[in-house]
Amino acid sequence: MPAIVIIGAQWGDEGKGKATDLLGSRIDYVVKFNGGNNAGHTVVIGDEKYALHLLPSGILTDGVIPVIANGVVIDIEVLFEELDALIARGVDVSKLVVSANAHVITQYHRTLDKVTERFLGKRQIGTTGRGIGPSYADKINRVGIRIQDIFDENILRQKVEGALHSKNQLLVKLYNRRAITVDEIVDDLTSYAERLRPMVTDTGLLLNQALDAGKTVLFEGGQATMLDVDHGTYPFVTSSNSTSGGASTGSGIGPNRIERVIGIVKAYTTRVGAGPFPTELDDEWGEYLRAQGHEYGTTTGRPRRTGWYDAPIARYSARINGVTDFVMTKLDVLSGLEKIPVCVAYDVDGVRVEEVPVSQSDFHHAIPIYEDFPGWSEDITGARTFEDLPKNAQEYVLAIEAMSGARISAIGVGPGRDEIVVRHDLLG
Ligand code: GDP
Ligand code: IMO
Ligand code: MG
């Protein structure tokens, strides 16, 4: 089996690690192709809980080669902190490879992320403050620093000088901050060079050779479709392509290598940060979902905004990404509800709209049109086959499948690695 892509089909935190776990031992390589340490993946293995940000969750699977590809922005300090924390818990991280073309996040990116957010006031994006946006902005603006630059101090110094020239003007004159010196950035980045060097390689070549040799390569997307800089709720998005196309540009493999696109959806919806969210619940049901689903951010600890399942968004994701299979997570969180509303379309200014509106203003004031499904009271965490699920839970899944644009091949029924119902083989 060649390349498989996993992407979030909503606003992130769908439980993408669950699908990675399901593929487990059948994967040879796991690739992070977008984003940086804005991601937060909580993976539960037995009694152990792991929180990863920059590293793909597949790093926890034995025998897999983890790859941080060119599309990622890397905060090197965070990279080593995360690696050290895993090493301390006995995880083998020695196989990690890092693209020479990935961009770095420096102190000025982190500072700019925070001050620009503050200056936006009410128009804040609610970023994770990790320097993601400013680092990608430099990349597109052609003043970014790449991993390979760290190994040539002369070049590095020139590039940092170029980048800081305008940034220091901004920091000092506009934002009232201290200027950052070229030396402090160069010293910081070069201090990592020795440890980093053995990990750095041409990951595009490596992955193409792996695919040619018939290896299975899993591309694990960070963030999600509705946070994609092109296809999400711009400007309330992250700064990378978190849709399946990003797996190709973010890693250097041809799009025709991708045979499966697995979209991860929660059985309801959550969002962190600002921006439109039609099915958001500001009432006690929103609080109920937050409490039952432990919906607090892995990266920033912020309470996640919560709401019912939104079928037009799932359909939108299915088509933007070419989803072949959905994995639905957290169905167990809905156990105990008498009825479960699902958004089937929107009311925009009195007109029924079946798809995600192209106009952001329409999406901002779209009112969900709900269809109610009967709930179930049984604990479903022990279910392992579809037939183990209560009839109403089966019907909820089938109804959502019919509305969402692709088959639902697996269903998460608890946070644990094995707490999953498989309907179709994701590699079959
Ligand atoms: P990611 O950003 O997509 O990797 O997801 P996060 O790790 O941020 O958030 C997903 C959370 O849901 C994690 O705490 C998981 O342990 C948890 N989780 C995943 N699948 C299930 C499930 O089927 N049921 C329950 N109750 N929790 C789940
Ligand atoms: P995972 O991989 C949920 C959101 C932030 C903010 C916006 C921009 O765990 O699903 P950024 O720091 O990226 O510039 O912030 O994107 N955001 C996420 N929300 N899950 C994530 O990742 C996110 N990564 C970024 O909250 O609204
Ligand atoms: Mg997350």
Image (cartoon, rainbow, N blue to C red):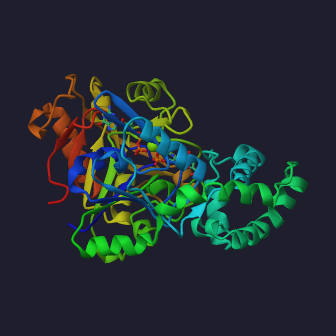
Vertical comparison of 143 with 343: above or below: below
Q: Residue 2 vs residue 349: left or right?
A: left
Q: Measured from the top left, where is residue 149 in percent x and y?
A: 63, 69
Q: Residue furthest front?
A: 194
Q: Position of residue 50 (x, y in %)?
A: 40, 36
Q: Quadrant of residue 328?
A: top left
The residue positioned 33% from the left and 75% from the top of the image is 208
Relative vertical location of residue 291 with respect to residue 110 in this rendering, above or below: above
Q: Residue at x 61, y 63 (%)?
A: 136
The quadrant holding residue 172 is bottom right
Looking at the image, residue 24 lies above or below residue 210: above
Query: Which quadrant of the rendered structure holds the C terminus?
Result: bottom left
Foreground of the two, 225 or 300: 300
Q: Is residue 177 left or right of residue 5?
A: right
Residue nearest the viewer, comparing 34 with 332 = 34
Q: Position of residue 217 (x, y in %)?
A: 29, 63
Q: Residue furthest right?
A: 173
Viewer-nearest residue: 5 or 205: 205
What is the quadrant of residue 179 in the picture?
bottom right
